[in-house]
Image (spheres, helix red, strand yellow):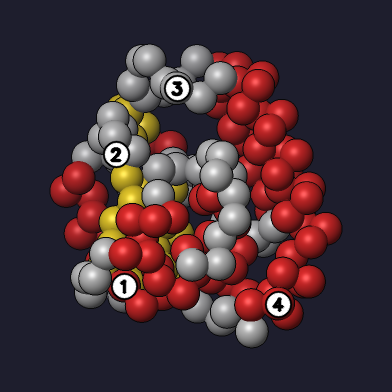
């Protein structure tokens, strides 16, 4: 993800999950936000959830998003929805400074975008749970939590090093 976002030369870059849990036509809503970064959100309008995750995955996702709000990016309700739009120049600047190779790249990129002063819009989007997720709840959940804690502890130092 990091390599693609820094090498592509486009006016806008969309990150979306390969399973297209969020239909691609929802990108129009992100463009309508008219901000340098717009992220799809399952949390803002639950009526747009066409097929929900099993309760334990939904609960774990909500708990993790609370941790992200506490330790990382305040004010965003769903940082892990795999549907994010970045203006091209913003994507290059942000992803060139990302270090995480795990599923935590989402919150790292959003933390950097916010630290650089870019406005982030959170937009309700349609979403449908797709069977066969590659995310393993316990293993990847603990890894993402660990990454979030390390990122929080080292973030200010890393920002100074990249300026």
Instruction: Name the spot of residue 62 as percent of width and height, x first.
Output: 62, 35
User: According to the image, label 4 marks what residue?
Assistant: 161
The reply to whether dot 2 and dot 3 touch (C-beta < 8 Å) is no
Q: Residue furthest right?
A: 153
Residue 30 visible in the shown view: no
- Indicate which disc residue 134 carries: 3
Q: Nearer the viewer, mark 4 or mark 2?
A: 4
Q: Residue placed at 16% from the left, 48% from the top?
A: 25
Whether residue 153 sits left or right of residue 19 in the image: it is right
Name the image quarter holding residue 133: top left
Give the CA separation, mark 1 to mark 3: 28 Å
Q: Residues within 10 Å of mark 2 (few under 14, many from 20)?
A: many
Where 86 falls versus 144 (above or below)?
below
Instruction: Name the spot of residue 109 as percent of width and height, x first.
Output: 53, 60
The mark nearer the N terminus, 2 or 1, is: 2
Give the CA separation, mark 2 to mark 3: 16 Å
Instruction: Name the spot of residue 49 as percent of width and height, x first.
Output: 36, 32
Give the CA separation, mark 4 to mark 3: 34 Å
Q: Residue placed at 36% from the left, 78% from the top?
A: 89
Give the CA separation, mark 4 to mark 1: 23 Å
Q: Tag 3, which secondary structure?
A: loop
Give the CA separation, mark 4 to mark 2: 36 Å
User: According to the image, label 2 marks what residue?
Assistant: 22
Q: Quadrant of the C terminus?
A: bottom right
Residue 34 visible in the shown view: yes
User: According to the image, label 1 marks what residue?
Assistant: 88
The mark nearer the N terminus, 2 or 3, is: 2
The mark nearer the N terminus, 4 or 2, is: 2
Give the CA separation, mark 2 to mark 1: 21 Å
């Amino acid at each position: 993800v990091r390599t693609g976002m820094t090498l592509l030369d486009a006016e806008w870059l969309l990150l979306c999950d390969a399973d297209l849990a969020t239909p691609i036509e929802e990108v129009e809503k992100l463009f309508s936000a008219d901000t340098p970064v717009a992220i799809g959100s399952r949390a803002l309008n639950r009526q747009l959830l066409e097929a929900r995750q099993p309760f334990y995955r939904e609960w774990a996702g909500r708990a993790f998003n609370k941790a992200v709000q506490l330790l990382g990016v305040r004010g965003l309700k769903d940082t892990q929805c795999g549907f994010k739009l970045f203006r091209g120049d913003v994507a290059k600047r942000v992803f060139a400074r990302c270090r995480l190779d795990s599923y935590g790249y989402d919150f790292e990129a959003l933390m950097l975008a916010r630290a650089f002063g870019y406005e982030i819009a959170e937009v309700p989007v349609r979403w449908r749970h797709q069977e066969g997720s590659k995310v393993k709840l316990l293993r990847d959940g603990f890894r993402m939590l660990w990454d979030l804690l390390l990122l929080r502890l080292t973030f200010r130092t890393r920002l100074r090093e990249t300026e």
